[in-house]
Image: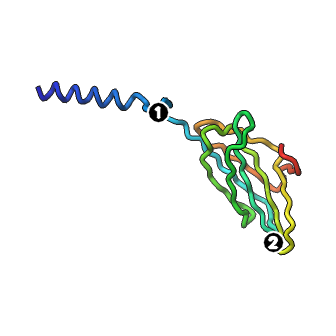
Amino acid sequence: MLFASAAVLMVGCEKENTSPSNGNSPSQQITTYTVSVSGIQVPSGMALEVLAVEYSASNERLQINRFDLTSSSMTRNYTANSRTEKVKIAFNASNPSTGQSASLWIQQVFYLDKGTNTVISITGSSPTGSSEP
């Protein structure tokens, strides 16, 4: 009798573990990306902010991750929104003493591979422009 009860319990537990309660697949793919910036010098008296802007397949802006560039080489890791398909990178440069600021976009769109980590490398020779790519 004890063996029969244990078998019923095991089958009941197995059934609960394999059926998702929220309608999604049991194993969600986590997509990450690494923004690596190198070879960019921040001019004295200036502040340089890096923006990683996430977009859906329909070009809907989903999320913006930001960090201040404080040295010529920095790396940041992010977990993408589950709907993110691509990332665009921008720089916001500002001079706190004068209040002047400018934005530059890296003229490349970075597509993410679902379920993996995508490395986005930005260097001092990466093409930039004033408009979004």
Q: Could you tell me which residue is drawn at 40 percent across and 28 percent down?
A: 19
User: Around disc 1, counting alpha carbons within 10 Å, would you say few (fewer than 14), some (14 to 19), or many (20 or more)?
Assistant: few
The colour scheme used to paint the residues is rainbow
Mark 2 vs mark 1, foreground winner is 1
- Whole-percent x, y for residue 94 in the image: 82, 65
Location of residue 96 by image quarter: bottom right
- Whole-percent x, y for residue 85 in the image: 68, 37
49, 64: nearer the viewer: 64
Q: Could you tell me which residue is drawn at 74 percent across and 41 percent down?
A: 110
Location of residue 10 by image quarter: top left
Q: Could you tell me which residue is drawn at 50 percent across and 31 percent down?
A: 24
- Secondary structure category for the residue under label 1: loop
Residue placed under numbered mark 2 in the picture: 96
31, 123: nearer the viewer: 31
Q: Residue 22 carries which label?
A: 1
Q: In this view, does 110 lie above or below 94?
A: above
20, 87: nearer the viewer: 20
- Whole-percent x, y for residue 80 in the image: 62, 44
Identity, as a three-letter code, of the amino acid under mark 1? Asn
Identity, as a three-letter code, of the amino acid under mark 2? Pro
Q: Residue furthest left?
A: 1
